[in-house]
Every structure is written in structure tokens, then in C-alpha cells.
Image (cartoon, rainbow, N blue to C red):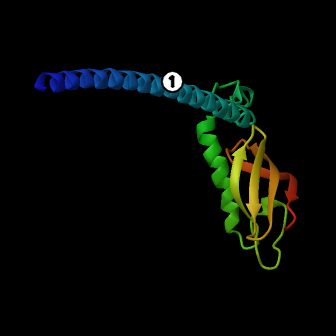
Amino acid sequence: MKKSILLYLVVLAGLFNVFTYAWFTKDQKFEKERYEKLDKKMHDSIQVLNNNLFDADYFSLETNDNAQNYFEDKTTGEFLAHQKLIPFLKDQLVAFNDQPDGNPYTGFDKISERKFIINKVKVLNHRWIIADFNNGTTWGEVLIKYFINDDKTVSFEVAETVIYPKR
């Protein structure tokens, strides 16, 4: 009787090992397929995000070689780098927010004692800037022309402005 119980235990252990091996092999294959699907999905998502970023930066001084070349002085070869110019332009434009009547380059005067200030600025090319502004309750956007003067100062001019209706 001991021999038959021992035989049953050996057979049972062998079957248990076979089924465990089969289960782990199938689980490993399933996990590998799941990882490959997830990896492909993530790669596709990253590619979509890169394409969206490329499209969003199409109108940007940072990616526009023609606009960057505009700042090269042909006679001296001196070049005004866009990496320094963009923060300089943003700082110059946002500095007007401190004026008592608000930023004059929003295209609007104060409304009910609330002055308009520029929040976000994007330099589109060698001539235009787009900016977002608000006064706390009213929001809008403005297209601004800018000019780099010979004395390295900046002149701004409002080209077009839009204000969004309140909801």
C-alpha cells in the first residue's frame, strides 16, 4: 500500500510539474505579447505627439530658418541668435504689464478698473508675435508686429486683436 501511495504521489507530482510548466510558458508568452502590443502603442503615441509638436512649432522663430537668417547682418556677418532674442522680446513685452493702465499692446484700455495684461507670448517669426491677455474676467489674443531697431531696441505695434465674449 505504501508503494501505491508513493506511486500516486510521484505521478501526481509529475502531472503537477507538467501543468505548472505549461501554465508558466503560456503566461510568459501572453506577457510578452502584451508587452509588444503596449510597446507598439506607446511608440505610435510618441510618434503622434512628435508630429503634433512639429505641426505646432511650424510657426515659430525657433524652427524657421528663413526668419532666423533675417537677423544676420550681411555686411559684418554678425548674427542675432534667436535663443537670446526670444526671451528678450518676451521680457520687453511683458514689462509693459506694470503700467497703471495695463499693457498698451493688448489693444484695449482698462474695463471697470481692471487692466489688461499679457500672460503668454509666442514669437512666430522675424516680424510677428502672438500673445494671450486678460483682465481677470475677459480674455483675448493679439497679433503684434515687432521691429529690432538699429540701436538694438525693440518697437512693438498692434496688428490685430480679438477679445472673447463672456459666457
Q: Which residue: 70% across, 24% down?
A: 74
Position of the N terminus by quadrant: top left
Q: Residue furthest left?
A: 2
Q: In the figure, residue 12 lies in which quadrant? A: top left
Q: In the figure, residue 107 lies in which quadrant? A: bottom right
Towards the viewer: 13 or 38: 13
Q: Which residue: 39% across, 26% down?
A: 23
Determine the secondary structure under disc 1: helix
Q: Residue furthest bottom?
A: 112
Q: Which amino acid lies under the numbered mark 1 shown in the image of this protein? A: Glu
The residue at which mark 1 appears reads as 33
- Residue 10 at x, y = what percent? 20, 22
Towards the viewer: 141 or 96: 141
Rendered position, 114 above or below 91: below
Residue 79 makes an appearance in the image? no
Q: Which residue: 63% across, 36% down?
A: 82
Residue 28 makes an appearance in the image? yes
Q: In the figure, residue 94 lies in which quadrant? A: bottom right
- Residue 144 at x, y = what percent? 80, 50
Crowdedness near tag 1: few (<14), some (14–19) or many (≥20) residues, C-alpha within 10 Å: few
Rendered position, 78 above or below 152: above
- Residue 7 at x, y = what percent? 19, 21
- Residue 50 at x, y = what percent? 64, 31
Left or right of 124: which side holds 163?
right
Towards the viewer: 145 or 23: 23
Position of the C terminus by quadrant: bottom right
Towards the viewer: 38 or 81: 38
Query: What number of labels is visible?
Result: 1
Left or right of 144: which side holds 3?
left
Q: Which residue: 75% across, 56% down?
A: 132
Left or right of 77: which side holds 12?
left
Left or right of 163: which side holds 155?
left
